[in-house]
Image: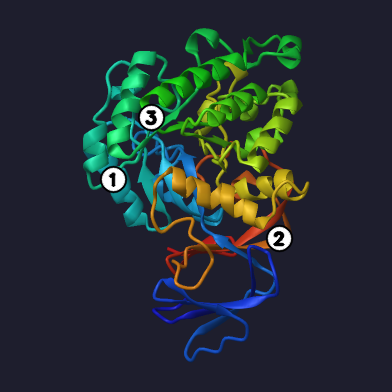
Amino acid sequence: MSGDRPLLLRGILPYGEGEPTDLLVADGVIAELGPALDPTGAEVRDAGGLVALPGFVDLHTHLREPGREDAETIESGSAAAALGGYTAVFAMANTDPVTDTAPAAEHVRRRGREVGLVDVHPVGAVTVGLGGERLAELGSMARSAAEVRVFSDDGVCVHDPLVMRRALEYSTALGAVIAQHAEEPRLTGGAQAHEGEIAARLGLAGWPATAEESIVARDCLLAGAAGARLHVCHVSSAGTVDTLRWARGRGVAVSSEVTPHHLLLTDERLAGFDPVNKVNPPLRTGDDGTALRAALADGVIDCVATDHAPHAPQDKDCEWAAARPGMLGLQTALSVVVETMVRPGLLDWRGVARVMSERPAGVGSVEGQGRPVAAGEPATLVLVDPDATWTVQAARLASLSANTPFEGMTLPARVVTTLLRGRITAEDGAVRG
């Protein structure tokens, strides 16, 4: 899109439905949607057969800046996000220094605006230094220019029930949500893999699903008592799905996310001891994956979040026990969702919009994101080729790190164009700064 000229996209399929139509972008909004549009002076592009969706929103991204710019920066992570169809990401607080003050949160927000490829929303820490003992400055972060609305100690669990209760109670007055990394640390000391047959055969210390499930059950009870909003990060087990369904039945305001890698991969990948498959929570069983996919389809799990966790080579190219947990996810998320959810008929393209855009925007309380593809709405969109396939190559991804578990896989669907309020930020595999 050149200058301030309107942009006319011919032949798109909003949500993959109906007959091809035209979409006119002007002044940052969808000015018109209909067949055979012919505005004077518009830049015209053939988008025949492309599916138009609201831009994706990732509730769980590790951008590593400040502190670990060798693994990722806000600039490189924003580029990966735009190329993956994302128009907003939530940057987790486990940076160095930790995002536990208003100035720290404002720095992340400001750097995101300077890069300008996606809206970067800082996640504030729940406790000072992620230490789990004293509440961080939740109020000042919420009222600051960063407008923090999501708080999480992700990477570690807020394991003290009294601290978690206070955080939930305080968050209600701020209109915020507490996002919990559900892991009872006394059950996971030394754990290296999902506790089960594979771990036993490989001689790896087991990580029981109950370490997640027990914290989720506790926090749902605490959130219900406080009348607070709870969000459960990276759900990985069938037992957690059962607990979420039970809590929702009791009226608890709990939302949750599942990662693309937990939708597709299982602990069978661990047989080769490749640290690229080491992640927290760990890859679990095929039965767990089946339960997660069903829960995402029926809405018990609200959304897909990448938990994009880049690591420098020295933190992954080492023996299994010493390797840091985490995987890349921003540029592969859509394709994995199509592979696991769309191809089997569990979601249609409207369902993809729900779990990758609309619901995460709602959980994160962000305006102007996750809006319908309709006239008068912000032109914050992603255009997808549903018939394309592509082969994942870490060297060609925008991240500074290479720890993708999908290396060499051929995946369906390809992001063609990403627009943020009418401005093209990524197109045909290249960012447009």
Q: Residue at x 62, y 13 (%)?
A: 208
> Circle 3 — which element?
loop
Q: Is residue 10 visible?
A: no
Residue sitting nearer the eye, 246 or 67: 246
Question: Residue 277: which quarter of the image?
Answer: top right
User: Disc 1 marks which residue?
Assistant: 147
Q: Amino acid at mark 3?
A: Gly
Of tags 1 and 2, which is closer to the observer? 1
Residue sitting nearer the eye, 421 or 279: 421
Question: In this picture, is 348 found above or below 302?
Answer: below
Q: Is residue 307 visible?
A: yes
Give residue 288's position: percent from left, percent from top.
70, 27
Give residue 126's position: percent from left, percent from top.
33, 27
Give residue 100's position: percent from left, percent from top.
28, 31
Answer with left or right where residue 188 lies relative to residue 228.
right
Residue 227 — which label?
3
User: Disc 2 marks which residue?
Assistant: 386
Mark 2, Cα crowd under 10 Å, few <14 / some 14-19 / many 20+, is some
- Closer to the chain start, of discs 3 and 2, is 3
Of tags 3 and 2, which is closer to the observer? 3
Q: Residue at x 74, y 16 (%)?
A: 198
Mark 1, Cα crowd under 10 Å, few <14 / some 14-19 / many 20+, is many
Residue sitting nearer the eye, 114 or 118: 118
> Circle 2 — which element?
strand
> Count of labels shown?
3
Q: Residue at x 27, y 18 (%)?
A: 134
Would you say the residues marked 1 and 2 are in contact, meaning their CB atoms lie under 8 Å apart?
A: no
Q: Residue at x 57, y 86 (%)?
A: 37
> Circle 1 — which element?
loop
Q: CA distance from mark 3 to mark 1?
A: 22 Å
Question: In this picture, is 123 found above or below 182?
Answer: below
